[in-house]
């Protein structure tokens, strides 16, 4: 049986997202469609939006279900994901954000590719790709539960 209220709410949510996207696209000045502008918002995201963007990137269905399961089965002390994620974001921001921004890097693989060459960059892309594929599978499995 299909939950009509759920389907309607999801459709309204996506229509709202589309409307905000169209509004933001019209608000943007024309002529600035470079790769950096599109992917990184011209490197001008403020602290408030940046915090929420990173949170939305890292926290998904797999994270929430995994954290809940770890706390339920082993207790709060053994649930490492929230602390590990928070520490990685803090240390990444303190030690890596400014140097990478000054160099104009777009991804975490860019400094490794500069140091070790494009062949190594291509090789290091494979574990990153597998991680993204498995992460997406974890999120879809969490949504299915």
Image (cartoon, helix red, strand yellow):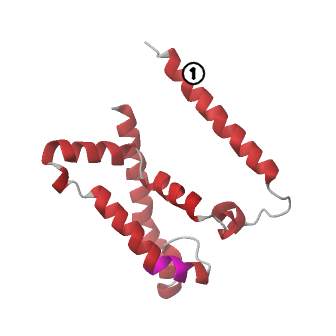
Q: Which residues are magenta?
A: 95-100
Toward the top, the furthest residue is: 1
Asked if residue 5 is positioned above or below residue 56 in the image, the reply reads above
Q: Quadrant of the N terminus?
A: top left
In the rendered structure, the answer to whether residue 74 lies left or right of residue 98 reads: left
Q: Which residue is mark 1?
A: 8
Determine the main secondary structure of the stretch shown in magenta.
helix
**Residue 90: % across, % down:** 40, 70
| Depth order, front residue of 72/118 | 72
Residue 8 image position (x, y, % from top left): 57, 21
Kindly identify the residue that appears in the image at 36 percent across and 38 percent down: 141
Mark 1: give few (<14), some (14-19) or many (20+) Cα within 10 Å.
few
Residue 23, picture quadrant: top right
| Residue 120 in sight in this render | no
**Position above or below: 138 against 39:** above
Residue closest to the eye, 119 or 14: 14
Number of marks in the image?
1
The reply to whether the magenta stretch includes residue 22 is no
Q: Position of residue 93 (x, y in %)?
A: 46, 73
Taking the view exactly as shown, the residue that stands out farthest to the left is 74
Which quadrant would the C terminus be assigned to in this image? top left
Along the line of sight, the residue nearer the viewer: 15 or 51: 51
Q: Is residue 117 visible?
A: yes
* Horizontal arrangement in the rendering, residue 105 relative to residue 134 (left or right): right
Name the residue located 23 percent from the left edge and 43 percent from the top edge.
Answer: 69
- Is residue 1 shown above or below 53? above
Q: Residue furthest right?
A: 30
Question: For numbered disc 1, what is the local secondary structure?
Answer: helix
Measured from the top left, where is residue 98 in percent x and y? 54, 80
Q: Residue furthest bottom?
A: 115
Query: At 47% from the left edge and 16% from the top edge, which residue is drawn?
Result: 3
């Amino acid at each position: 049986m299909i939950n009509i209220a759920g389907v309607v709410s999801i459709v309204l949510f996506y229509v709202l997202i589309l409307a905000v996207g169209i509004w933001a696209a019209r608000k943007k000045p024309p002529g600035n469609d470079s790769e950096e502008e599109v992917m990184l918002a011209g490197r001008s995201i403020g602290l408030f939006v940046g915090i929420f963007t990173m949170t939305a990137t890292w926290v998904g269905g797999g994270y929430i279900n995994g954290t809940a399961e770890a706390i339920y089965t082993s207790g709060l002390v053994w649930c490492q994901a929230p602390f590990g994620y928070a520490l990685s974001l803090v240390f990444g921001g303190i030690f890596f954000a400014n140097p990478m921004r000054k160099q104009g890097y777009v991804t975490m693989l860019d400094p490794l590719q500069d140091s070790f060459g494009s062949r190594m960059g291509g090789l290091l892309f494979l574990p990153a790709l597998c991680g993204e594929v498995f992460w997406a599978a974890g999120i879809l499995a969490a949504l299915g539960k």
